[in-house]
Image (cartoon, rainbow, N blue to C red):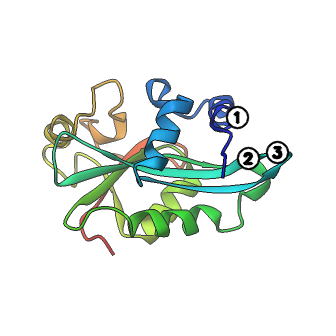
Amino acid sequence: MHIDWEQLEADMARTGAFYAPRLSAHFLAHNFYDGRAIPRVRPAGKRMECCAYIAWLKTPHPRYVEIALAYVADDLKGNGVLREIMAELLSTTPTGTLPFLITGNPAMKKVAAGFGFQTETPSCSHMPRYFAHLVGISDDRLPDSATRKAPRYVRASERVLMRCFDKQ
């Protein structure tokens, strides 16, 4: 099966929702061939078009993995594809690791909450910056909602750090 990784990179870049240094065809393919990504493909001429993708990434701390690069093509949104690939991905993460993610996508937040992820805010954790340091999240990637001094309700489209304390 030959997946068109360049097309996936272009489709993901077009959304403007991904951390640019991670968005390369080589990186997307590397995660797949290392068994850390779940793609959904469909035929597109002689190639296979990737219409959904999600990956888990290693962090500097061996206990944590980051769920990242979640993408679902526009024509498949709302059909449960994200929930399906997230379930499959979580079953492939190493035993004993705890996943986390950073997202501003309301659909991803809802799916993640269904798998036991909780939004990290200063009111529920005393050290979000320390956690970020442990897992290699730079200050420019850490969402404001995780470090705000005065806690408040997190808006639906606001970027959040979500952690899962009990992998299902």
Reply above or below: 158 against 64: above
Report the amino acid beneath label 1.
Answer: Gln
For label 2, the SS is strand
Image coordinates for residue 100, horizontal then vertical, percent: 32, 52
Lower sequence index among marks 2 and 1: 1
Q: Please give the residue where the numbered disc 3 appears in the rendered image.
A: 46
Lower sequence index among marks 1 and 3: 1
Q: Please give the residue where the numbered disc 1 appears in the rendered image.
A: 7
Image coordinates for residue 145, horizontal then vertical, percent: 35, 40
Labels 2 and 1 touching (C-beta < 8 A): yes
Distance Cα–Cα, label 1 vs label 3: 13 Å
Distance Cα–Cα, label 2 vs label 3: 10 Å
For label 3, the SS is loop
Left or right: 69 in relation to 75 = left
Image coordinates for residue 34, horizontal then vertical, percent: 40, 49
Q: Quadrant of residue 147?
A: top left
**Residue 124 badge:** none
Report the amino acid beneath label 2.
Answer: Glu
**Residue 49 badge:** 2
Q: Nearer the viewer, mark 1 or mark 3?
A: 3
Q: Which residue is at 16% across, 45% downward? A: 61
Labels 2 and 3 touching (C-beta < 8 A): no
Distance Cα–Cα, label 2 vs label 1: 7 Å
Q: Nearer the viewer, mark 2 or mark 3?
A: 3
For label 1, the SS is helix
How many other residues sit within 10 Å of disc 3, few (<14), some (14-19) or many (≥20)?
Answer: few
Reply above or below: 6 against 102: above
